[in-house]
Amino acid sequence: MTRNTPIDNKKKQALSQALTNAVGFLSSMVQIREFQELIRRTYFGKDKRRGIAGTYQWFVEEVGELARAMRKNDRAALEEEFADCLAWLVSLATLHGIDMAMVAEKYRAGCPKCGVSECQCEDSGLR
């Protein structure tokens, strides 16, 4: 016969936080997956005809437009160009058969190198 032992408050809080984090992450995965599906439905035909190289060129052009918006510090242009870069990046992933929700898992716990949500790695100037 097993006895139910009470869980102390600290353990309850830790379990509750872990559950909250898991639910939040799953919700984020669904949102990423939904966005990727929206972009696929909207642009996949054109992207497929254009091919990976052509789609990549469009992506790079959008990154250039983002750089210009950053230089000007134009908030409206920044929002537009970040959105465009995200959409083109997702299009490229779709053409390669990559599920962006799954690859986002790499950063779920924070920095993939040190595993901390505020990276503690030595800054080499590059990631």
Image (cartoon, grey):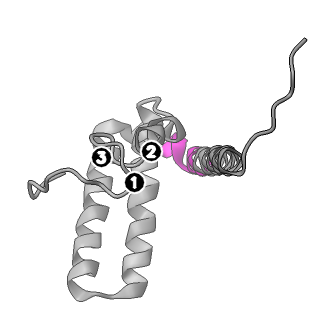
Q: Main secondary structure of the magenta part?
A: helix
Disc 1 to disc 3, C-alpha distance: 31 Å
Image check: 43 left or right of 107? right
Residue lying at 46% horizontally and 56% vertically, measured from the top left: 87
In this rendering, the answer to whether 17 lies above or below 113 is below
Q: Amino acid at mark 2?
A: Ala
* Residue 43 forms part of the magenta stretch: yes
Secondary structure state at the residue bearing disc 2: loop
Q: Which residues are magenta?
A: 35-46
Is residue 21 one of those drawn in magenta? no
Whole-percent x and y of residue 98?
A: 46, 32
Could you tell which of marks 2 and 3 lies nearer the N-terminus? 3
Query: Which quadrant, please, contains the N terminus?
Result: top right
Q: Residue at x 25, y 53 (%)?
A: 120
**Residue designated by label 3:** 56
Q: Which residue is mark 1?
A: 117
List x then y, in percent, for residue 49: 43, 38
Under circle 3, the secondary element is helix
Near-viewer residue (47 or 35) = 35
Dot 1 and dot 3 residues touching (CB under 8 Å): no
In this figure, which residue is indicated by the disc labeled 2?
109
Say which of 102 and 95 sits in front. Answer: 102
Of the residues shown, which amino acid type is indicated by label 3?
Answer: Tyr
CB-based contact (under 8 Å), mark 2 and mark 1? yes
Cα–Cα gap, marks 2 and 1 = 6 Å
Label 1: element kind: loop
Q: Residues within 10 Å of mark 3 (few under 14, many from 20)?
A: some
- Side of 101 where 60 appears, left or right: left
Is residue 114 or residue 55 the one in the foreground? 114
Q: Residues within 10 Å of mark 1 (few under 14, many from 20)?
A: few
Q: Earlier in the sequence, mark 1 or mark 3?
A: 3
Among the 4 quarters of the image, the one containing residue 26: top right
